[in-house]
Image (cartoon, rainbow, N blue to C red):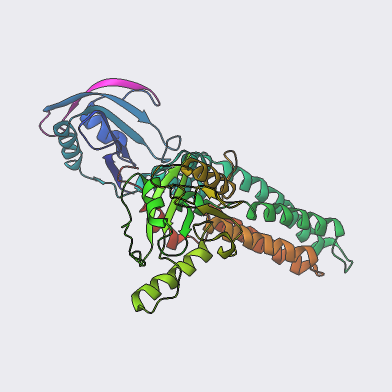
Amino acid sequence: MDTIFALSSGRPPAAISVIRLSGPDAHEAGERIAGELPEPRTAAVRELRHPQTRELLDEALVLRFDGPASSTGEDVVEFQCHGGRAVVDALLDALRSIAGLRLARAGEFTRRAFENGRIDLTEAEGLADLIEAETETQRKAALALAEGGLRKQIADWQGRLLGLSARAEREIDYDEGDDVDPALQHDCTELAAELEQWLERPRMERLKDGVRIVVAGPPNSGKSSLINAIAGEDRAIVTAIPGTTRDYIEVPLALGGIPILLTDTAGLHGSGDVVEALGIERTQQLIGAADVLVWLGEPADAPAHPRVIKVHAKSDLPGRDVPPQGSIGLSSVTGEGIAALLEVAGGEAASLLPSADAIALNRRQAEHLGEARIALSAAAVSQEHVLVAEDLRQARGAFDRLTGRAGVEDLLDVLFGRFCLGK
């Protein structure tokens, strides 16, 4: 196993930069640069010198960690040096000069933590999401995964499932009757129902990608003006000519800490223009895929949608000052009604996201949890001891794939490639 090193803090210049080493030769390499290392899990100030020339590079704080009680499960050394570019470059060059050391690949420190059993796959996914988090809700959800919230719950399920499997195997060996124990079937049903409750929770994808709020209506109903007013800048072209918007425009926003993907669309009407007709067809598709629909046309013409907000736009114009019942009066010119619209839209969006204290599953996690639920449901109705045991074995395999203990090799390069260098 190679010993790896990398800058693990932000790009210089900075007040402090952290350079990390991990691997079997980490302590020896650290001693060649810093001299005697401090006691494990303690810090000490040391002079950092080039291993060949003994030139003084910096005076820095040095920390030592002994595997397996380290972040990667290996021997680790950290140099907390001054964050100037010249200092960081000199220290990295000094490490390159030591045989057996190489620069770490993106995500390699975290991958070693996973491979050495320090974290499971759900925690690694949480760390990747935490690095990419842009809103408060994304940060909280990612932190819950990174700190092992789902891992602990899975460990509880696995313990219960192992007990069920032991009971099923015992029936094969010692039960001379033909009937499967009703108590075993009941417990399988109970665990399957618990997994189903988790599968019904709001998913991580909306939290990561944003709740899609689609603004739709007929031409010249004020859609693009509304988009620009909410975004605070001209993101969509606004003219009096019908059909100006021919394709959709996406504007990512944070609304009260909630990630939003605000989408402007082509006006809905009959058109003989081929390009405009394609835009209208795409609008229909976007309406069907919308999490929340903001409708700027006549209320009676609003498409059927479970979460539609009806808007009476251009309320600043003569004769449009009184909105129809159930519609929000709004003017993109004066700003009237925009706050009310955002409040309603934010409430609808929040209802689609996990609560602040809930653990959200991503698509991969839900897929494997669903496999375990299906296998447990099959075990609950199987009438042969051997089939019950096999169904429970299938459920255990699904949990192993969920935590990364089996069948995830094709996923690892993609996952850890999301991490930055030095993480």
Is 31 in front, or is 13? 13
Is 258 in front, or is 403? 258
Q: Quadrant of residue 10?
A: top left
Q: Which residues are magenta?
A: 41-54
Q: Is residue 401 something one can see in this rendering? A: yes
**Residue 251, x across and y down, in percent:** 38, 52
Q: Is residue 116 something one can see in this rendering? A: no
Above-or-below relation of 144 to 15: below
Is 117 in front, or is 290? 290
**Residue 317, x across and y down, in percent:** 43, 50
Q: Is residue 397 magenta?
A: no
Viewed as shown, does residue 87 lie left or right of 10? left
| Residue positioned most to the front | 318
Viewed as shown, does residue 183 lie left or right of 263? right
Q: Is residue 47 magenta?
A: yes
Residue at coordinates 19% horizontally, 42% vertically from top-left?
Answer: 96
Viewed as shown, does residue 20 lie left or right of 170? left
Q: Quadrant of residue 239?
A: bottom left
Above-or-below relation of 292 to 176: above
Viewed as shown, does residue 195 lie left or right of 110? right
Above-or-below relation of 24 to 368: above
| Residue positioned most to the right | 177
Residue at coordinates 46% horizontally, 44% vertically from top-left?
Answer: 338
**Residue 171, x across and y down, in percent:** 82, 61
Count of labels in the image: 0
Residue at coordinates 34% horizontally, 41% vertically from top-left?
Answer: 24
Instruction: Check the picture and name the quadrant holding the C terminus.
Output: top left
**Residue 404, x across and y down, in percent:** 51, 54
